Amino acid sequence: MTLLYQWHELGRAWMAPLAYMAEANARIFSAQGSWLSNLPGAERIAASNELIYRIGKDYEKPAWDIHEVEVNGLTVPVVEQEIIKKPFCRLLRFKRYTDDADNIVALKDDPVVLVVAPLSGHHATLLRDTVRTLLRDHKVYVTDWVDARMVPQEAGAFSLDDYIGYVEEFIRHIGAKNLNVISVCQPTVPVLAAVSLMAGRGEDTPRSLVMMGGPIDARRSPTEVNGLATRNPLSWFENNVIHSVPSPYPGHGRAVYPGFLQHAGFIAMNPSRHFMSHWDFYANLVKGDLQDADSHRRFYDEYNAVLDMPAEYYLDTIRVVFQEFLLPRGKWKVNGELVNPAAITDTALLTIEGELDDISGLGQTAAAHDLCTGIAPDHQQHITVEGAGHYGIFSGRRWRDKVYPQVRDFIAKAAG
């Protein structure tokens, strides 16, 4: 199981000198004051070299880079705090500070939100825009998942049941009675399971659940992502996409679904779009359109930064969510306990879907309403965002201008 990963690491090592050289060439043929930048064709040489550099470079986990936010017309500093550190996840809080007495009172009264980020290939920083926007009106916590290749084998395995256990622990730690939970894509399923189990035991549950673009019932409007999971038996995934982490990573020997394989799958879903994006990047550099070029850099710095998923968790998700559909069929047990969403009674439910979502098809997230029969109808709401794809419902202008105001108002109503 290790050989493919080792070959990948060897290829990265071979590419590194070329990438570094290309980066240096790009700089010296574009830097102001460099005599090389005045040569004929220098802009094309610089653009070609930067493109080579960005294709060949390593993409590490991006920083959250949230240092301030505007609240009530005032720019407020934001500090990233690690609240809980577990082997496979850190619970972070982005704490807002102000010297203004009136704003201090307002900040203290804001609703508390836990954003459960996906563990599905990209780092939690993919939700940077989600978190930054929520900080305008909320106290925000977020799950920051750890790259499995960085977790020593001594930490043990990590399954879908363990994921649910983490979510339960975080909810209890923050305090369920005053908490609103937002889950984006993959975590809609384990979050609904966690809250269902807590409700079934008689524990306090969050004031509201906001579920965005997730496969609650993957049988509805199946996408290409769903098709891949249903076309192949579980053994195919075990034999073809699970590999062991090589040295010198701390997780040496751990079985994972490698990030580089996931990234290849992302690209393969729409290769022409990525090719044209890179061609446009080259063209923008040549003609000096630095704003569009910088937008390309920011997007791919995030998109190309992927993490390894624990094999147990990945295979559990394939089986439970995409092959056996245990949640909507009412047959899912977690550590012997039946997951029963109908047990939830004191939590408001909002589901959000993108009209053009090609990852979680229309109806997959809305299916939560059919399962949560214990929630009063006037505490349930569904939004279909016209013209939005998967990412548009939680990131970008459409999220900030159209989706967020409705999320904010729903949470405020639940808090009231």
Image (cartoon, grey):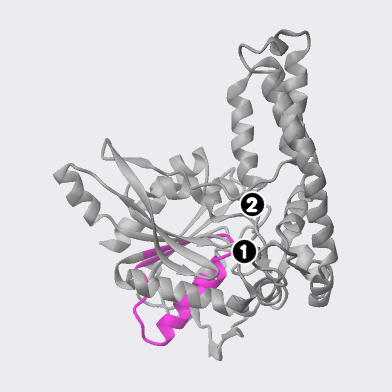
Judging by the rendered image, the residue that carries numbered circle 2 is 357
Instruction: Tell me which amino acid carries mark 1.
Output: Met
Which quarter of the picture shows residue 287? Answer: top right
- Residue displayed at 50% across by 83% down: 340
Q: Which mark is residue 284?
A: none
Which quarter of the picture shows residue 320? Answer: bottom right
Q: Which mark is residue 150?
A: 1
- Residue displayed at 47% across by 64% down: 90
Asked whether, in this view, residue 190 is left or right of residue 373, the answer is right
The foreground one among 203 and 371 is 203
Outermost residue toward the left?
A: 101
Seen in the picture, residue 146 relative to 75 is either above or below; the reply is below
Q: Is residue 196 magenta?
A: yes
- Residue displayed at 61% across by 39% down: 299
Asked whether, in this view, residue 311 is left or right of residue 72, the answer is right
Residue 120, position in %: x, y?
Answer: 63, 61
SS for dot 1:
helix
Range shown magenta: 180-209
SS for dot 2:
loop
Tell me if I can see residue 371 in this picture: no
Instruction: Tell me which amino acid carries mark 2.
Output: Asp
Which of pointers 2 and 1 indicates the residue nearer the eye?
Answer: 1
Structural crowding at the residue carrying mark 1, measured as other residues with C-alpha within 10 Å and reported as few (<14), some (14–19) or many (≥20): some
Q: Is residue 318 magenta?
A: no
